[in-house]
Image (spheres, rainbow, N blue to C red):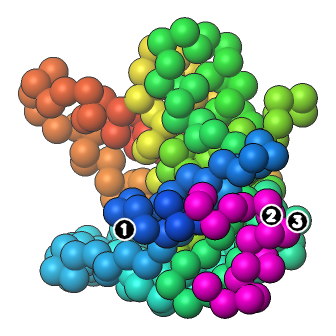
Amino acid sequence: MDKSLTSQLEKWHISDQEWQSALQSDERICYIHNHQNQMFWLKKKAPARGYWRYKALNLFSRLAGIPLIKSVPQYGGQTALNTEARRITSLASKGIVVPELLIQQPGFLLLSHLGDSLIIQFKDPNTSQGRKRALLTACLQAIKSVHQKNQHLSQAFVRNMVQVSEEPLIIGFIDFEDDPKTVMSLPEAQARDLLLFVDSVARFFLQDRAYFQQAITRFLAGHDPQMVRTLKETTNKLQWVTRMPFQSLLGHDYEKLKLALLAMKTV
């Protein structure tokens, strides 16, 4: 291990044993907990994902005239790590809550731990519906704040949103190994953020549909008109999904997708 890396690890009080254990693990993303009760994430290189799957998705996107669902290249390897480092640095410079980039070297990144994924709270049967409402509102406010700064996210699923603090309830974002803006405009990338988030969280509001729709309506109020138009064009083209026959046989995943599309139809 070179002296520069040793010095950096000492700065964060990460022992050689802790570091080597994470580095040699088969897990691509490893959790490190140092003796001062600080937490970190080591992200290593990953292979690129399904070339043919992306080709098929892009073909469907062109045929359907729905640019938001085109695939965003996930190159893997060092390219993905460089993209994540670049995006974290850029978003942080705009005051957006993302992990701190602590170490960047060929083959890995070391990132600070922001907090636990919100998906844990949403899935917990002991989480009240009032709490889920509060989390939904906080997430939408956080996403809107990103957009108001003329920025966009990457994989805006609820699993990639974390709770940073409780009072005030602050939401942060993780996972930036790809950049949608390499294949679409900023309004499209922002509309995609909402599309991914709403689809990933709708299942927790199947019995609370009115509030869910109102929250999205509030989010869109005062948003960039071009983004709203882009979203409306997409959701209008996908409304056929909500009118499929034999819906009672299509299961829970269909119900949450239907709710997401109907909620965004109120644009």
User: Foreground mark, 2 or 3?
Assistant: 2
Few, some or many residues within 10 Å of mark 1 (<14, 14–19, 20+)? some
Which residue does the image show at 30% across and 29% down from the upper left? 255
- Note whether residue 128 is visible: yes
The question of residue 44 being in magenta is answered with no
Where 125 sits versus 190, above or below?
above
User: Foreground mark, 2 or 1?
Assistant: 2
Q: Three-letter amino acid code at disc 3?
A: Gly
Where 211 sits versus 161, above or below?
above
Numbered range of the magenta stretch: 1-18
- Drawn side of residue 104 relative to residue 266, left or right: right
Sequence-first tag of 2 and 1 = 2
Front one among 17 and 26: 17
Residue indicated by mark 3:
95
- Drawn side of residue 203 relative to residue 43, left or right: left
Which residue does the image show at 53% across and 30% down from the upper left? 120
Residue indicated by mark 1:
69
The residues tagged by marks 2 and 1 sit, at their Cα atoms, a distance apart of 40 Å
The residues tagged by marks 3 and 1 sit, at their Cα atoms, a distance apart of 28 Å
- Drawn side of residue 86 relative to residue 248, left or right: right
Q: Three-letter amino acid code at disc 1?
A: Ile
Sequence-first tag of 2 and 3 = 2
Q: In which quarter of the image is residue 110?
A: bottom right
Few, some or many residues within 10 Å of mark 3 (<14, 14–19, 20+)? few
